[in-house]
Amino acid sequence: MSRKLLLNNVHVEGIHTYDVYRKTGGYAAVEKALKSMTPEEVVEEVKKSGLRGRGGAGFPTGMKWSFIAKPEGVPRHFLCNADESEPGTFKDRYLMEKIPHLLIEGMILSSFALGCEQSYIYIRGEYMYVLRILEKAIAEAYQNGWLGKNIKGSGFNLDLSVSPGAGAYICGEETALIESLEGKRGNPRMKPPFPAIQGLWQRPTVVNNVETICAVVPIVNEGGEAYAGVGIGRSTGTKLISAGGNINKPGVYEIEMGISVEEFIYGDQYCGGIKNGKKLKACVPGGSSVPILPHYLVCKTAEGTDRLMSYESLAEGGFATGSMLGSGGFIVYDEDQCIVRNTWNFSRFYHHESCGQCSPCREGTGWMEKVLHRLEYGHGKIEDIDLLWDIQRKIEGNTICPLGDAAAWPVAAAIRHFREEFEWHVKEPNACTTRNYGLVTEKVFEKVNA
Amino acid sequence: MSEQIQQIKVTIDDQTIMVDPGTTILSAARQIGGNVVPPAMCFYSSLKGSGGKCRTCLVEVAAGSEKDPRPMPKLVASCSTTVMDGMIVKNKSSERVLDARKGVVELLLINHPLDCPVCDQAGECSLQDLAFEHGASHSRYEFERREFDQIDIGEYIKLHMTRCILCYRCVYTANQLTDNREHGVLKRGDASEIGTFIENSLDNEFIGNVIDVCPVGALTDRTFRFRSRVWYTKPMDASCSCGKCSGNAVVWMIGNEIARVTARKDKYGEVKEFICNDCRFNKKELSDWKIEGPRHIDRHSVISANHYEKAAPIHTPLLNKA
């Protein structure tokens, strides 16, 4: 059993209440930090821990914190990005629903480290019931003196509130989140200036993912070096993976970084293998926006070494033969799934969620969706595949925010690895509406058996 | 003062210029002028916050600065990227840029109705110019285009949302020139539309300027709609005494009649002196205006093609003396 740092006590009865959370050692990190540490020391511990952003990009958190501008007399803000809307990712919801106080504790620590006196949790509108859980927990924290003025006599003040979005995926992008929190339309801002210089209300701001903030708690408790001891290489600590798709045991798993992908998919304590004894066809390891991996690249890299659950190993081979850890939305496809349909589905999502601000993404996502729809329903042409490739290439990298990339990557990877299946949809227009490619041919699996 | 500012060096398409720190690549390119200037559909120098949206001004930065000569991995929007000392920018000399720009033009056009033959903007449309210079000869888009109903927003302005490329210029104009924020962008993605939410009219004294800032024919002047193609009208610089604005405008004449009035645009299609609605929509008599002389039309060759300008260019020293 690998080590757990966040979900240790998740199954304790009543852990969502303050009393139980406190009894299981909760708020010890805040006590420790406020009594015996300076804000700089907390930042230093986070730097030592090597913690990387868990929202998708994997940027070192300590470094992000050290970028924050500290002009005299200007308040700073710390924001929690709980706008988790990536298809396939549901780890933050689990954390907030089960142990809301862990997030609050992390928020207090992070705000203390950055010297912020007003912090916000920006939660997606669909998580309204989670918002109520959080608000209850925040009220409890206020009652017990963990929030408010002069927390536990340390002289540190912090106000924390939860603010719901209106259900837009784009508001998970940090500058769009800030715009939305300011009450405006959630359009991403141009960078620079980065939020660390001019963020919420033009003040220096740091935005972190829920899981990143929660991870600060064990870092302060056990020290940065101890945290860095868990995991592998530059992927330190543990990561929550939301596993879904055709597996026996879907759910949220906390894994130590560096276990092999094979163990994760087939291991009994994790996904427990492919459902109904079927074969693995493909896997999206980090939420819908990362490139899909065909079965022969899931457990092994192109070089033939074992693929591990870590930022580096999953990205090995670049986009040609690798993918990304992303936000940890682990989607597994068995042999019967249709990749074209899946790509169309993802594409439909990005079309729906594009904010419409910059032209490549606004127009391109809709175009890709239409072409994919045509292919999936047997009206496609063979040139459509190259057309799709061309459209995604015109979007990727040319947009203001990463949503354009996120829309382009899955399409690119699907064509790169499953071109045959796309061609089959064109060649067999009648068959492709009634059967899936996997049910027709065993060809895909030749490589794995060889 | 000016000597104290340390000017910095920037090279665009092998042409070097010294500019003030904080200048954007686009404005540095405009200072050089000529062929190195990237096209801009959404950027408007006098509107704060504009730019970055259309992505037609993407350029390649081959060297970030003197100190850090690494190239930037992505193409950057030249309208919102500030120059660094020793930066080397590639615009038309970069295949990557031309390819990306071609892509952007194609994407901008997939939902554009291409109804230029009946569009009032034809002849002075930035999207026409852009597509002519950078676009492909045909579109690969085979689906239905986005369509909206035409709306009259106020007595003078027609909103033809189908033609809109969502540059947000009119939104910034309304926000920054007029007292009330009256319209904005509704909905999301390719369904987003410019709107007044509950179909209010736009009736601010300066709201007519949204027509001038619109790069396409989405916002047109209802007093001029379908009266004439712009290249059949004669543009004349004219001025009037107006209490609200500078009174400097261009009147577009058919014979001795004033067909329409617009503000004066520079060669990048930008208005420096915005005019009020009174001047634009109500002063349609010759007696209202003092005619200064023919308007020099720079980029829009269609308009200047049939005109007297070739015979007597306005910038000759002879005329300037007079």
Image (cartoon, grey):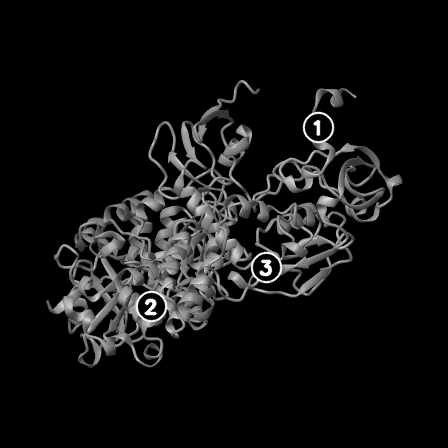
Q: Amino acid at mark 1?
A: Pro
Q: Chain of mark 2?
A: A
Other residues around mark 3 within 10 Å, as few (<14) / some (14–19) / many (≥20): some
Residue position for label 1: B313
Task: Say whether residue A257 is left or right of residue A409.
Answer: left
Where does label 3 land, which residue?
Answer: B113
Same chain check for tags 3 and 2: no
Q: Quadrant of residue A191?
A: top left
Mark 1 or mark 2: which is in front?
1
Q: Chain of mark 1?
A: B
Circle 2 residue: A88
Quadrant where the C terminus of chain A lies?
bottom left
What secondary structure is marked by label 2? Answer: loop
Mark 3 or mark 2: which is in front? 3
Q: Is residue B19 left or right of residue B113?
A: left
Residue pictured at 87% horizontal, 41% vertical: B286
Q: Residues within 10 Å of mark 2 (few under 14, many from 20)?
A: many
